[in-house]
């Protein structure tokens, strides 16, 4: 704490007087990457990059998974990173399911002809409710909560 206030005084005094003793203290302030209190804008710029990143990220919307236009009516899209498959059984109706097949845990690989398909052993699940329509799986895919905000689909 006392170092900070000393540095402030040093910065002001150095600007005005340039005494050798104070110049030595000036090196100190360089080490702390706080070059003088006279130019507040430049020192502020040096210390805020991480804050700028987080604030710009916050402004871009929270967890938008997809745009509604990305999801085909009567089909769906798999988001492997999120382990979610989003479907649109009928126009404007969106559903989401966990991509883990309830048979033996493979990730489902595709959505076609109204079903979510696991290629490991051929299970097919309804895009409407995730229920098994064919193949060895007997349990439905786990439904995942989503909300539609404007044209964005967001994980609930
Ligand atoms: Fe999906 Fe067997 S793990 S069908």
Image (cartoon, rainbow, N blue to C red):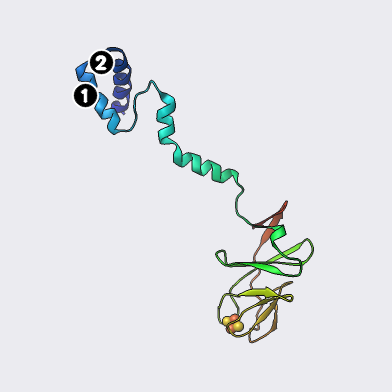
Residue at 69%, 60% (x, y): give it. 70
Q: Quadrant of ligand 1?
A: bottom right
Look at the image and tell me in which quarter the N terminus lies: top left
Label 1 CB less than 8 angstroms from ligand 1 = no
For residue 13, above or below residue 61: above
Residue that appears at 56% across and 78% down:
106
Residue furthest top as drawn: 17
Identify the secondary structure beneath mark 1.
Answer: helix
Q: What's the residue at 62%, 79% (across, down)?
A: 118
Q: Is residue 65 left or right of residue 133?
A: left
What is the crowding at mark 1: few (fewer than 14 residues within 10 Å), some, or many (at least 20)?
A: few
Q: Position of residue 32 (x, y in %)?
A: 30, 33
- Please name the residue that numbered disc 1 is placed on: 24
Q: In the depicted view, which residue is nearer to us: 145 or 17?
A: 17
Specify whether 70 is left or right of 21: right
Asked if the residue at tag 1 contacts the one at tag 2, i.e. Cβ–Cβ closer than 8 Å, the answer is no
Closest to the observer, 110 or 29: 110
What count of labels does the image hold?
2
Mark identifier at residue 18: 2
Q: Residue furthest left?
A: 21
- Image quadrant holding the C terminus, namely bottom right
Picture coordinates of residue 45, whole percent (x, y): 44, 32
The image quarter containing residue 50 is top left
Residue 112 in percent (x, y) is at: 70, 75
């Amino acid at each position: 704490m006392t170092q900070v206030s000393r540095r402030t005084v040093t910065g002001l005094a150095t600007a005005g007087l340039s005494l050798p003793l104070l110049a030595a203290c000036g090196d100190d302030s360089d080490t702390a990457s706080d070059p003088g209190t006279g130019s507040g804008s430049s020192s502020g710029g040096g210390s805020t990059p991480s804050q700028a990143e987080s604030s710009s990220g916050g402004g871009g919307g929270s967890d938008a998974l997809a745009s509604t236009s990305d999801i085909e009516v009567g089909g769906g899209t798999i988001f492997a990173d999120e382990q979610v498959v989003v479907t649109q059984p009928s126009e404007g109706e969106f559903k989401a399911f966990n991509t883990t097949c309830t048979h033996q845990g493979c990730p489902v690989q595709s959505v076609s002809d109204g079903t979510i398909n696991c290629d490991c052993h051929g299970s097919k699940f309804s895009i409407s409710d995730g229920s098994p329509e064919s193949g060895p799986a007997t349990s439905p895919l786990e439904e995942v909560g989503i909300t539609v905000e404007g044209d964005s689909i967001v994980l609930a």
